Amino acid sequence: MSEQIVFCELAEAMKEHEILHKNEQSAKQSWENAFQKWSNYMVLGEGSIDGYGCCGYGSMCDWCTDNSYGRPCVRALNAMCREKRIKIDYTNRDFKSVWMGADGG
C-alpha cells in the first residue's frame, strides 16, 4: 500500500512540474511577443534610427541573421543571450532597461 502512495505523490509532483513549465513557457512567449512589438514600434512608430530596438543599431543586431520573417529581434536577442550566457527576467516589461542590460550599459 505504501508503494501506491509514493507513486501517487510522484505523479502529483510531476503534474505540478509540467504545469509550472507550461506557465514559464507561456510567460516567455508573451514577453517575447511584447518585446518584438516594442521593437517594431521603435523602428516604425518612432521613425528614429538612433533609438533602442532600431534594426541594425543595437548590440543584439550583430546576431540578427534574417529580419525578413517572424520575430527577428527576439531571435537575435536569444542568440546573443545564449552566446553571452545572459538570463532575461521575463517579468520585466521595461524593454529599454532590458535592452540596456543586454547591451552592457
Image (cartoon, helix red, strand yellow):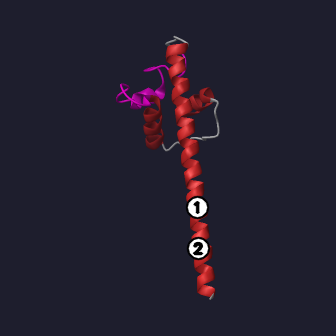
What residue did someone put label 2 on?
Answer: 10
Q: Is residue 50 visible?
A: no
Label 1: element kind: helix
**Residue shown at the point (56%, 25%) measured from the top left:** 38
Residue drawn at 59 percent across, 57 percent down: 19
Q: Amino acid at mark 1?
A: His
Tell me the crowding category of disc 2: few under 14, some 14 to 19, or many 20 or more residues within 10 angstroms, Cα based: few
Q: Which residues are magenta?
A: 50-72
Residue 98 % position (x, y): 59, 32
24 in the magenta segment: no
Q: Is residue 69 magenta?
A: yes
Provide residue 63's location: percent of width, then percent of height.
Answer: 40, 32
Residue 57 vs residue 66: left or right? right
- Residue furthest to the bottom: 1
Which callout, 1 or 2, points at the residue further toward the start of the chain? Answer: 2
Residue at the image position 61 percent from the left and 68 percent from the top: 13
> Residue 75 location, x and y as percent?
43, 35
Q: Quadrant of residue 91?
A: top right
Figure quadrant of residue 35: top right
Which residue does the numbered mark 1 point to in the structure image? 17
Quadrant of the image containing the C terminus: top right
Give the distance between the C-alpha atoms of the residues marked 1 and 2, in whole angstroms: 11 Å
Residue 25 location, x and y as percent? 54, 47
